Image (cartoon, rainbow, N blue to C red):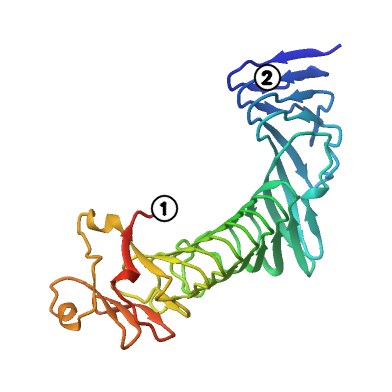
């Protein structure tokens, strides 16, 4: 005989208990379900006799636990019964895995009996690196969120993260060195964000597929100019790329109307090299009076614009975002001024070369504006 646990039309938190053969019904609302795991001494065993029914709303079931460093298998939850019902529903999993060369963690091989689930969420801990060759994390074909924490050094191994179809999100935090991290996202509106611990050295290659993608490189937490190298290539689509920190990154933005944020905090002579690609692109440029922040390969005077932060005028020491094309106005100014020298293909801020152009450009006031930033 089954025990029924019922929610209502509101958002419910429903937890399975040690009682076997429970049926949990969320009904309406955005409901949160929790599995029950029996204590088996050194490990736990999920109670797969329970059944979960989401009903209407965007429901969440967690947390499945796969410890692949011990005896865990990707089919440990093959009997899990969850019907998400209407709405955008999620199954959440914790995964512990060693970075074994030549091994692929194929999340699409996780076996369950769930239905009507649109989103899979994974919290993945990367542990000891062993062997040689590529260690690969590959997602499934639904919308996937991968929150990856690299807890051991991967200095001797290449790490790859590959997502397939769907709108995927990858958050990668390196607490130890990673010489070669390759991230490839498939078709869909994907999101990738990298963070690294202060002492980490990291090499990144990021390739996004067709879709409206977002790539954020948080490099300001890495200590030295050569502790981060990053090559980023975004496919067709209106992409957003945020280059933040103190290191020289290489970006090929591809076709589409892209938003490219070039933030400061750079070490001297660590400018980002950027190819904006085809399309009407916007470069959100943070003012820096001390270092070159960008070298632009193919800036189009006909299509592309610089966007300065409107909040620069409201800070305690406001900075002038008006661009002059007259050398005399720039030289005689009592404050740091933006000066576009078309003859030398350089944009100055104060005495500092803020941006260099590798091609001949003839910019006008129409190529510069002020707006509200999202990052």
Residue picked out by circle 1: 374
Q: Which mark is residue 74?
A: none
Q: Look at the numbered disc 2 and give the secondary structure of its residue.
A: loop
Horizontal arrangement in the rendering, residue 297 relative to residue 120 (left or right)? left
Horizontal arrangement in the rendering, residue 360 relative to residue 152 (left or right)? left
Q: Residues within 10 Å of mark 1 (few under 14, many from 20)?
A: few
Identify the residue at horizontal 69%, vertical 54% (top origin): 126
Q: Which mark is residue 27?
A: 2
Does residue 270 appear anywhere in the picture? Answer: no
User: Vertically, is 356 above or below 206?
Assistant: below
Where's residue 182, x and y in %? 66, 66
Viewer-closest of 266 and 336: 336
Where's residue 324, x and y in %? 22, 75
Q: Look at the numbered disc 1 and give the secondary structure of its residue.
A: loop
Does residue 81 appear anywhere in the picture? Answer: yes
Where's residue 279, x and y in %? 50, 68
Considering only order in the chain, which callout, 1 or 2, is on the residue closer to the N terminus?
A: 2
Snapshot quadrant of residue 368? bottom left
């Amino acid at each position: 005989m089954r025990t029924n646990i019922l929610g209502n039309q509101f958002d419910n938190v429903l937890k399975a208990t040690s009682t076997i053969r429970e049926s949990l019904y969320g009904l309406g609302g955005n409901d949160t379900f929790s599995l029950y795991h029996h204590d088996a001494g050194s490990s736990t065993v999920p109670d797969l006799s329970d059944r979960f029914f989401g009903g209407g709303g965007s429901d969440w079931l967690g947390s499945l636990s796969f410890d692949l460093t011990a005896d865990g298998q990707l089919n440990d939850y093959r009997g899990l019964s969850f019907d998400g019902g209407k709405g955008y529903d999620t199954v959440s999993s914790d995964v512990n895995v060693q970075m074994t060369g030549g091994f692929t963690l194929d999340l699409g091989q996780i076996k369950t009996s769930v239905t009507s689930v649109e989103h899979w969420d994974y919290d993945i801990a990367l542990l000891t690196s062993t062997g040689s060759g590529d260690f690969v994390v590959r997602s499934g074909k639904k919308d996937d969120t991968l929150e990856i924490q690299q807890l051991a050094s991967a200095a001797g191994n290449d790490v790859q993260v590959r997502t397939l179809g769907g709108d995927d999100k990858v958050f990668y935090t390196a607490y130890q060195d990673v010489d070669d991290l390759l991230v490839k996202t498939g078709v869909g509106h994907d999101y990738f964000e990298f963070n690294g611990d202060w002492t980490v050295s990291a090499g990144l290659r990021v390739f996004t597929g067709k879709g409206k993608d977002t790539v954020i490189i948080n490099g300001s937490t890495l200590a030295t100019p050569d502790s981060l190298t990053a090559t980023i290539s975004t496919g067709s689509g209106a992409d957003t790329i945020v280059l933040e920190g103190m290191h020289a990154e290489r970006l090929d933005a591809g076709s589409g109307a892209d938003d490219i944020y070039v933030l400061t905090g750079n070490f001297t002579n660590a400018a980002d090299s950027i190819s904006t690609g085809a399309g009407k692109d916007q470069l959100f440029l943070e003012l820096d009076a001390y270092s070159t922040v960008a070298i632009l390969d193919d800036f189009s005077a006909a299509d592309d614009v610089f966007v300065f932060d409107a909040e620069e005028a409201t800070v305690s020491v406001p900075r002038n975002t008006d661009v002059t094309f007259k050398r005399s106005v720039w030289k005689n100014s009592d404050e740091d001024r933006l000066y576009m020298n078309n003859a030398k293909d350089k944009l100055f801020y104060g005495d500092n070369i803020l941006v260099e152009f590798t091609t001949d450009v003839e910019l006008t006031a129409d190529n510069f504006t002020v707006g509200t930033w999202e990052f």
